[in-house]
Image (tube, coloured by chain):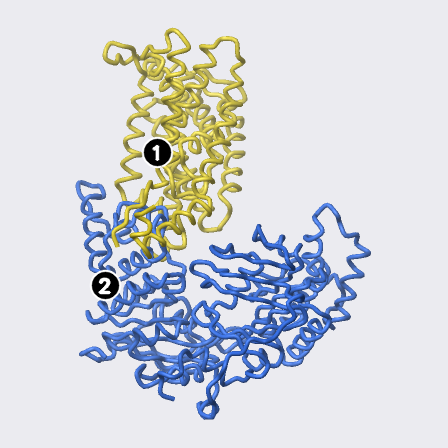
Amino acid sequence: MAQDSTTILTMTGISKAFPGVQALSDVDFALRQGEIHALMGENGAGKSTLIKVLTGVERPDTGVIMLDGREIQAKSPLQAQAQGISTVYQEINLCPNLSVAENILLGREPRRLGGIDWHALNKRAAEILRRLEVEIDVSQSVGMYPVAIQQMVAISRALDVSAKALILDEPTSSLSAHETDKLFAVMEKLKSEGLGIIFVTHFLDQVYRVTDRITVLRNGKLVGTYPTAELSRVELVAHMIGRELSDLEAVGRYKTRVVEHDHAARVVEARDFGRIGGMKPFDLDLYAGEVVGMAGLLGSGRTETANLLFGVDQPDSGNLTVEGKKVTHHAPLQSIHMGMGYCPEDRKADGIVGDLTVRENIILALQASQGWFQYINPAKQYAIADKYIELLDISTPTADQLIKNLSGGNQQKVILARWLATEPEILILDEPTRGIDVGVKAEIQKLVLTLAQEGKTCVFISSELDEVLRTSHRVLVLRDQEIVAELGMDDLNEQTIMQIIAGDTHDEPL
Amino acid sequence: MKRTPHIDRKYLPLMVTIALFIGLYLYGMVQYRGFSSPQVFYNLLIDNAFLIITSIGMTFVILAGGIDLSVGAMIAFTTVLSAYMLENLGLSPILVIPGVLLFGVLFGATMGAIIHFFKVQPFIVTLAGMFFARGMCFVISTDAITISDPFYRAVALYRIPVFGTGFISINVVIVLIVLLAALYLAHLTRFGRTVYAIGGNEQSALLMGLPVARTKILVYMLNGFCSALAGVVFSIYMLSGYGLYTNGLELEAIASVVIGGTMLTGGVGYVIGTVFGVLIQGLIQTIIMFQGTLNSWWTKIVVGLLTLVFIGLQSAFNSPRFIRRAEARAIRAEADPALEAAK
């Protein structure tokens, strides 16, 4: 801990409700001078809402925010900045077309003779960056530099507006290990200068490397604030996913076991397959008739793996073979032709087309796979739509209802129907049950198992461990963008998976 | 963390534009007698003075991520309004010129305010502005009005000798003043840099605390001023006002900006590039004139092709693949400098 441990920022009793969700209820948070404070939690825990409240993007329903003993309530990010709270977002807010120097000093440029003094501007920007031990040509456009440098530029800008508290929102998610080291060095330096840093991340290793304290949120509630040195990884994971430590203490050591498979039935073979900033190169085999679960924390690389397999993202290394054929062109349409289907995680953004009808949404992937010139005639479209509406028990008055008027669970079923209609051999489901009620969840899980029985392959990604366990024949555990373990039937239990997610258990006290 | 990117890709389109201009000029000089006379170059400036002025205004609009379709109609309207006030109302040029310029500024401000505060697409707002201005021309006069004002005539006929090699008109002097002012605005003022920032990423500009609203409206005001000034220059050049003048000129201005290397998506480009964009169009016309047998409409065809080529170049320079490759290279170099150096 830093020498000076006075609290500079406190948030007390913060609550915030959005229509239908209590995003935050009665959350307390305190940041000290000269500390790095991790804010942790799974999806929907309320981290981002807390940050938004702090930075003036959202206004809390109740609660008080004090900075330096004064009550503040920023109405905009700009005001928050002026009061001394600066944020560096994951999608870095810079103007990529302008020079590094301008991005740091825009709005506060040094001037001379009625014009911008470019020489002084570049000199000052270089000095500010040097404080972070970054030496680059500040007259180049910022878009030419890698994300790591852009991040340093964004931090420099934040610091130059004289920040007291700096929020780093997922700063390391697209950095290489080496770049992350540099960022951490900078964070340590700023900490020693007395700055309070809130560090939002999903990487457990990083939390243990740099933070002094950890605050865990779950379902909009505060779980607790702990000194990092006194909280074991397994305890942290247990807090995040809401399991008791006593559950874990009974656990023995685990053993990874490769499940025996009939090699003739291997449908997907990935070798050394990876993407810089997405997933570290991995090997993966999928066999016909099995459900393969993927477990891991948010940001561990689950969705990235799915995107790579389906060709949404281009791999940087390795190769992929589907049904014995090597994939040469990684693109979703190609994957559909090879018999793959993919229900993405964010159905609102990536899945449904809100202004189309249920029928049109169901037919979408099938039509795409047949080519747009082989129009599926309306009678056949209705037949297909009605078949899946009945099969999946989608509650909609007619097939012509706009999909945006359906409930979340029914929208999810429509997306499932869309892929089932293409009769895929391999179906990747990313969080298929998020935000839908228990009854529908069970139906979807059952459907996945039925598909496997029919000889199809399903990849089942979910944050809910019990669900992964219930539906999968085999579970891949991911951590920090790496597949760290593969568990067969016999080893499948929650405790084992949690320990693997938490990292090496043998060097941590339990 | 010292690292120097290879070439800043923002300069590439500008370099291509200037190279094209020089190339075309050399071609003309080799092919045709008399092309190397300095007066050919001066005439380029004289004949395109109004287009350069309005294209400079357009550059700011496009840099800020907008578009303005009203400039051609605004120029025509300015010529008609000026001619009407001079001839039919008998007003002095001392009143007429500031009057029409002020009208241009107000017209731009209105469009800018509608675009910003009502969040309407600039395309739609300025399209409406275009129809309005074009229609207003004929409300004032359906026929061409000849300008016989002695001041206008004197300015139109005055020749300024240049190093004894030829002459330029007063309009060219106005162009040079506008150009210098525009370069100053774009590169040495907070306004100019904010224009670039908005074009680069409006959301970021807002979060950086820059005056986005004010700057966006100012950009359309500036362009309104430039189109009105181009109208004044054009009425001096033609010595008349007519509602059918400069039909479709807004598109020529946009083409000049694009050929000059400015990205239609905003944020990247240079005022000086736009000047070369206009001069390239003028040069093609001159070459076709010297050639003698080709129809002058070929100019349009060549300009169309060039616009296409330049848009293609821009997307090539900004394609994710081009950028990703550069980034991947940088990441590898960072991770293993020795390996990269060995390559």
Name the disc covering residue B271, or none: 1
Residue in front for this viewpoint, A260 or B147? A260
Looking at the picture, does residue A273 appear above or below residue A64?
above
Residue in front for this viewpoint, B235 or B65? B65
Mark 2 nearby-residue class (10 Å; few <14, some 14–19, many ≥20): some
Three-letter code, disc 1: Val
Residue in front for this viewpoint, B308 or A116? B308
Looking at the picture, does residue A248 appear above or below residue A67?
below
As helix, strand or loop, the secondary structure at mark 2 comes to loop
Mark 1 nearby-residue class (10 Å; few <14, some 14–19, many ≥20): many
Q: In which quarter of the image is the C terminus of chain A?
A: bottom left
Q: Which chain is blue?
A: A
Colour of the chain lettered B: yellow
Q: Where is residue A417 in the image (x, y as percent from the top left)?
A: 70, 65
Q: Is residue A376 visible?
A: yes
Q: For mark 2, what is the residue?
A: A162
Q: Quadrant of the N terminus of chain A?
A: bottom left
- Dots 1, 2 in contact, CB < 8 A: no
* Residue at the extreme top of the image, as rendered: B33
Looking at the picture, does residue A275 appear above or below residue B278?
below
Spatial separation of the CA atoms under disc 1 and disc 2: 35 Å
Q: Position of residue B204 (x, y in %)?
A: 38, 55
Q: Where is residue A211 in the image (x, y as percent from the top left)?
A: 30, 75
Name the disc covering residue A453, or none: none
Point 44% across, 26% down: residue: B81
- Relative to A330, is B104 on the left or the right? left
Three-letter code, disc 2: Ser
